[in-house]
Image (tube, helix red, strand yellow):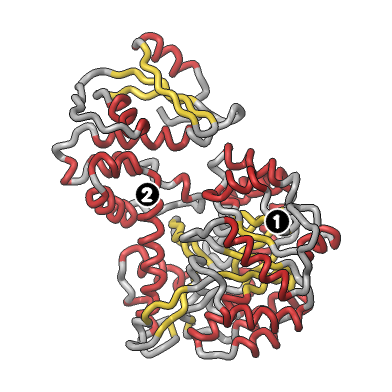
Amino acid sequence: MPALADIQAAVRDALVSGDRTAAARMLSGGAHPERRLAIHQRHYAASLTRALLDRFPATVWLVGSELVTDAARSFIREQPPSKPCIAEYGDCFPQHLGAHPAAAALPYLSQFAELEWHLGRLALATDDSPNVHYLHLDWSLDELLGVYLADSAPDEFALRHDDVWLEVRGLRGTLEMHRLAMDDFLERASGRPTGARR
Amino acid sequence: MAITSDARLRLAERTGIGLRLPHIAEVVATRPPVGWLEIHPENFLANPHGLELLTDLARDYPMSVHTVGISIGSADGIDRTHLTRLRELVDHLNPALVSGHLAWSFHGGHYLNDLLPLPYTDETLRVVAAHLADVQDALGREYVIENPSTYVSLADSTMTEIEFLHALVDLTGCRLLCDVSNVYLSGRNMGYDPYDFIDTFPAAAVAELHLGGFTPEEDEATPGATLLVDTHAQAVAEPSWQLYAHAIRRFGTQPTLIEWDNDLPTLDVLAGEAAKADRLRGYSHEGCHAGTC
């Protein structure tokens, strides 16, 4: 009789990598019980892909769902969740997305997604929780994200390759982005307990 | 640490609904006529604003906390950090019930975001019993265990699910959440009579009942056959309602919750499902509104 740990390792491998070989020997139920694992395999992949797409709607708006979905699928395989709060899953997705082959011509994509990650987190903030974050951007991505947030559709948008020293604030669904002078940014970013990684 | 009889009685009078984030603003604004609210705490651990709204609702509605990430059957053990976060939330909300699933979702450092099947063996019994004690100690209150939805079983199980539940109750004294829809769909999927399952379920241990929608899907293991999948994406099906009527004849009036987590309906539709369960238990809605009956 296989140990519980061995059973769970085999099922985990089936879900994460798709390899049902080990799990098949341990299952019963129907003529081909290992095929019933497909329900759990589908749920694992679909639920986490959906969670990432829902977490990065502006990024989907910018580059389309096909690229983001493909990056999500590889992200789930390579960096599956390590904790049960799925709302916190995906903080490393911007970097993974930026490394996707289809993003080679989009050098700003990773930073755009990272900005969106922090906006999504800060939109849920209250007075008593971390509600400000500081980001340095290499492009005018705050203006680009502003187009998305305003639901506007300009005929043209010129993304500028600029140093942007950005303060982002959130409170109960409202968001503010403020450009700062570099010195002011560095002082505020070093002195404030934002709870953020940067 | 036991559920107070007063808190359980308040839950038992009227059916509750699962409170999901897309509905929360409307529930705050309109205070729908339902008996209580159940949350998945993992939706609020990184959502301070959501927790503020929940705190407001907790003044008018009894609350239940239904965990999805504890992984009580995990051979790797329980995530202590997650338990600490849950304790903080539970202490803040003071729910009438805290519950979770007889399942596992964590192994080898990976959280698999699903409720996965356990073999029903002596080893699993020891693991679940030990983790149950840890969880109750960490949360400072009783933790009620829910029967799973089943699509595949483990070949080396030495007990049936019913035998395992009886053994778990005998060993730990725990209470059980009987998900009636899970009983129906698991019986269909695994080839047993759901009414027999209800008739042999540890009745004295029942603390709560759940009802939720399921979705038929093709059974890849048996071409041409259908599996019922616990999607919580539809209204409660008629066979589940019939099984629920049978269950309350056996278990008596128990706190009942309508689960609807995906493809959410309007709040009116959800409240309508709760009202249907109320009628089955013989509860009259005349003169009642939010949280006052």
Tell me, for residue A52, which label it has, or none: 2
Viewer-side residue, A79 vs B185? B185
Q: Residue at x 37, y 24 (%)?
A: A135
Asked if marks 1 and 2 fall on the same chain, the answer is: no
Residue B189 in the image, given as x and y percentages of width and height: 48, 84
Query: Which chain is mark 2 on?
Result: A
Q: Is residue B140 visible?
A: no
Would you call the spot at circle 1 few (<14 residues within 10 Å), some (14-19), or many (20 or more)? many
Furthest residue toward right: B6
Classify B248 as above or below B17.
below
- Of the residues shown, which amino acid type is indicated by label 1? Pro
Quadrant in the picture for the N terminus of chain B? bottom right
> Label 1, on which residue?
B33
Which of labels 1 and 2 is toward the front? 1
Element on which disc 2 rests: helix
Residue B214 in the image, given as x and y percentages of width and height: 50, 73
